[in-house]
Image (cartoon, grey):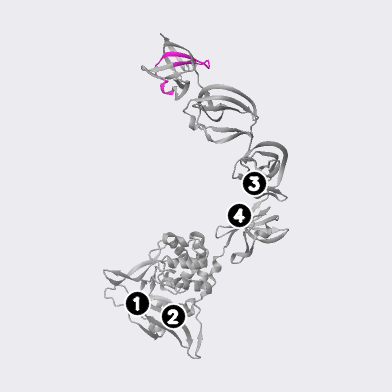
Amino acid sequence: MKKILKRTILIGTVGLVTVSVQSVMAADNNQTTPSSSAISTSEVSLSESSTSSSTTTVDSQSATKETHNNSESQAKPQNNVILKQNTQIGPGFYADDGLMMRSSLARTDTRAFLESIRQGSINSWNKYGVLPSTVAAQAILESGWGGSRLSTLANNLFGIKGNYNGASISMPTQEYINGRWITINDNFRKYPSRNASVEDHGRFLNDNSRYHNLLWQTDYRKVTRLLQNDGYATAPTYAASLNRIIEQYHLNDWDNERVVQKSQVKMVGKVNGGQPMYWLLNTGMQLSGSNTNRIANKAVTVTQWIKTSANKEYYLANVDGKTVAWIPKSTFSESESVVARKQLKLTGHVNGGQPMYWLLNTGMQLSGSNTNRITNKAVTVTQWIKTSANKEYYLANVDGKTVAWIPKSTFSESEKVIARKRVKLTGHVNGGQPMYWLLNTGMQLSGSNTNRITNKTVTVTQWIKTSANKKYYLANVDGKTVAWIPKSTFSESEKVIARKRVKLTGYVKGGQSMYWLLSSGITLSGLNTNSIVNKTVTITQWIKTSANKEYYLVNVNGQVVAWAAPMMELRTNCSI
C-alpha cells in the first residue's frame, strides 16, 4: 500500500517557509489516517533563502531534497543533512531537510519518546527549577519527537554544540564566515540518554540570566510566555505551540510534586485556617479543592510525613480517627500539653511584639494577637505552666482581667523599692550598661545605656534597693537627671586628702591598673603596668584618697607615666 504525504509550503517574502503537515492518506482506500504527532497539525517555521511568494504541493520525496550551492563546502553531509541555526524554534542547530523529516512522525511511538524524557524533565525541575511540562514540550518541538539526526545519533534533542562530559559527535553545519555561508564539521554534545539531554537543557536555562524569571514558576502557560518574551525563540506562535503540545499530551501532569521521602509519625495538634489541602495521587500532589478551615478548631492527629520533589513537606491529617487530607507541614502546630502548673503572684511588664496564647483542651494555641497592647501596662501574673515541649508560660492579667498566656521569657518582674536614701557621690560609670526608669510598677529599662555618659563626671543623688535585692543609683550629669543605673556600674571618685613628695626607685608587678588624677578625683586610665614591668621606676609623689587608698606617681626615664597603687605594684630596691 503506497502512502503519500501531502504538505503545503508557503514561501514568504521574508524568507521563511511555514510547513503544515496535513495528513497521511492511504491510496488504495482514499481514507485519511491521523498522525500520532502533536506537531502534525501545528505550524513550524524554517529558514530558507527564497524570497518569492507562491504555493506549491509536493510529495514527501521532493520535499526532503535541499540544494546547498556552496563552492567552499569541504564536508560531505551525512544523509544530505546539514545542521544550521534556526532561531524560530530555539538557539540550537537543526536540519534544513523539512525539519527533521516530518514524514517519519507518522511512525513515531509518542508514548516511548515521552517515557524516555520523563525523568530528565523532572530532574530539570528538581535541580534547576525549569517546569517539567515546558522542557518536555521544547524537546518534542526541537527534536521532532526524537526524529532529528542529532537525536538519533547522539540523544541531542536541542542541537547544542560542544561536548557533554567529554563526549561529542562531529556533524556538518553551516557557518556564516567572511560574508558567506560555508559548511564545516563541528562538534555537538553527545548524551548517554535523552533524559540527560533534557536535564542539560534545564541547566542551560538556569545558567543564562535572561531566563531566571521563569525558574521555579509552576504555571506552564506563564513559563511558555516568558520563554517567548525572553527571546528563546523568534516564532510569534512559539508559546502557543508549546501549550498545544502540553495540553494534548497532558504533560502538565508531570508538574505535580513527586514523593521522594516518607515516614510514619504520630503527633497531635492544630492547623491554621485558610490553608490548601491535597490528595496524593499516582501523578503526585494535587489540590483537593478544600482548605483547612473545616478542621482549624479541631484536634488534628498527624500520622504520616512526606517530602516531595519540589522540596515541600506535608502531613497526613486525621480528625476523630478519620483521614481528612494532606496539609502543608507549615500549617500544623503540635499541641503542648501541660506537664506542670503552679499558682503565683508577680507584677511587672512585658516586651512588645511577642505572641499570646489560649490554653485549650488540645494544648497551647496562638490567640492571634500579641503583647503590643499591654506593653505599657502593669501586668500581674497569676499562673505558671510548663508544657510537653519544655516551654514555660505565664497567665497575664491587666486591671484584674485575664488577657492571655504569654511566654515566660517576655515578662520582667517589677522591682519594687524597699529601701531608699539620699547620697552625694561623684565619679564615673562603665560603658555598655543598661539604664532604667523608676515607674509606679517598679524599675523598667529605659532603652538606652551608659555609653552616653561614660566620659563625663557623674553625680549620684539617690540610692535605692528593690524587691529583687538589686541596688541602683540615680545618675546626674551637669546638674540634670539622666536615669537610674546599677550601683555596680558606678565608681566613686576618690578625692585627695593627703599628699607628700617622695623619691623611690624600684620595679613594678605586671597586670595592675594605673590611674589619672583629675579634678574629680582618681579615675582609671585604661592602662596597666605590663608596659613598664622590666623598667626602672621612680616614684615622685604619694597621695591618700577619701576612700582611704594610697597611690604613687610613677615615672620612667624622667617622664610621668600614671598613678599606681604602691602596696600592689612597687618592689622597692632602694630608697633615697
Residue 379 vertical position relative to residue 501 in the rendered view, above or below: below
Please name the residue that numbered disc 4 is placed on: 330
Element under disc 1: loop
Label 4 packing within 10 angstroms: few (<14), some (14-19), many (20+) = few
Q: CA distance from mark 3 to mark 4?
A: 19 Å
Q: Earlier in the sequence, mark 1 or mark 2?
A: 1
Residue 428 position within the rendered picture, expressed as x and y whole percent measured from the top left: 50, 25
- The secondary structure type at the circle numbered 4 is helix
SS for tag 2? strand
Cα–Cα gap, marks 1 and 2: 17 Å
Dots 1 and 3: beta carbons under 8 Å? no
Residue tagged 1? 15
Give the foreground label among 1 and 2.
1
State the CA–CA distance, disc 4 to disc 2. Answer: 50 Å
Mark 3 and mark 2: span between their CA atoms?
67 Å
Residue marked by disc 2: 20
